[in-house]
Amino acid sequence: MKKKINKKFVIFGQSRSGSTLLLELINAHPDINCEGELFNKIYRYVNPKWFLLMLRRFPVLYINHRLKKSDSPVYGFKLFFFQVNDPEKLLKQLNRRGWKFIWIRREDILAQSLSNILALETNHWHRRKNENARQQTLTIPPERLLKVLKNRTRWKIKEQKMIENYDHLPVVYERDLKNKEKWQETLDKVFRYIGVEPVSVKTNLEKTDVRPYSERIENYDELIETMKNSQFAHLLENTDL
């Protein structure tokens, strides 16, 4: 018999923010089914691609469909604001329907931007414990990094303006997820916010590459010099590369 869903939540944020790690830790709970990016064509929740593009215009209908398919009493999914046509409207609609919001963010925009560029270039987004790390090195054009930083800065401001209108639980990667020793404490807060009893959590996700960026990026010194002479120089003071 299908269980009645009585609790709903959204992981709201950006890529390379720790959202997949958070999702997997949340899914350690036996009463929770948290899906990934419903509106990302890569994950093929919907085929063909044109149908997904249409659903981005009518996201609530699609979300309700996924909700009804779930067999767990608690359902969640992951959402990046740029994946739907009108994210402000969607958040408002979900809030009215009793959805809770978990805002995952990464404060180190520079590390987040570099991580995203490397993942795009290598097509290597995640790694499991039994998988070997790929020892690739890449050259990143300085102008590309600056462009990504501009976008990430703009997205962060827009994202914050959208989510601050609603009650939400903030999860900061550096504070709450970067250190494995903080996982249980963080997830205890998440589970209580969602409205379920905390359970022990674990995952076999590992960092895609444990090497520092200075070893992964061939022109690392050039990028740092470019940063020093740009509007993003202040980011070098608050990074752990």
Image (cartoon, rainbow, N blue to C red):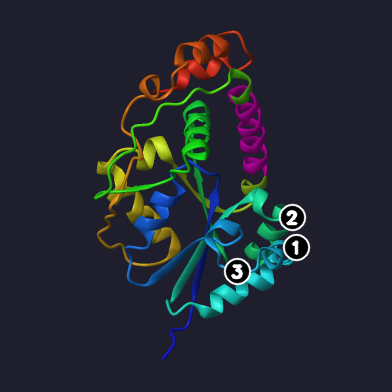
Task: Identify the residue at horizontal 38%, vertical 36% (top origin).
Answer: 175
On-image quarter of the N terminus: bottom left
The numbered mark at residue 46 is 3
The residue at which mark 1 appears reads as 57
**Residue 178 in which image quadrant:** top left
Q: Earlier in the sequence, mark 3 or mark 1?
A: 3
Local packing at callout 3 (Cα closer than 10 Å; few below 14, some 14-19, many 20+) is some
Chain-order first, disc 1 or disc 2: 1
Principal SS element in the magenta part?
A: helix
Asked whether 208 or 95 is in front, the reply is 208
Distance of label 3 from label 1 (alpha carbons): 14 Å
Q: Please tell me whether residue 152 belongs to the stretch shown in magenta.
A: yes
Whether residue 196 can be seen here = yes
Residue 43 in the figure: left or right of residue 28: right
In space, the residues marked 1 and 2 are separated at their CA atoms by: 6 Å
Q: Residue at x 26, y 49 (%)?
A: 129
Percent position of residue 66, x then y: 56, 73
Q: Nearer the viewer, residue 227 or 27?
A: 227
Q: Rate crowding at label 2 as few (under 14), some (14 to 19) or many (20 or more) other CA atoms within 10 Å.
A: some
Against 222, residue 59 (above or below) is below
Residue beneath the point at 35% across and 56% down: 25
Q: Quadrant of residue 217?
A: top left
Disc number placed over residue 85 in the picture, else none: 2
- Element under disc 3: loop
Q: Is residue 118 left or right of residue 198?
A: right
State yes or no: discs 1 and 2 in contact (Cβ < 8 Å): yes
Q: What residue range appears in magenta? A: 145-161
Q: Amino acid at mark 1?
A: Arg
Q: Is residue 191 magenta?
A: no
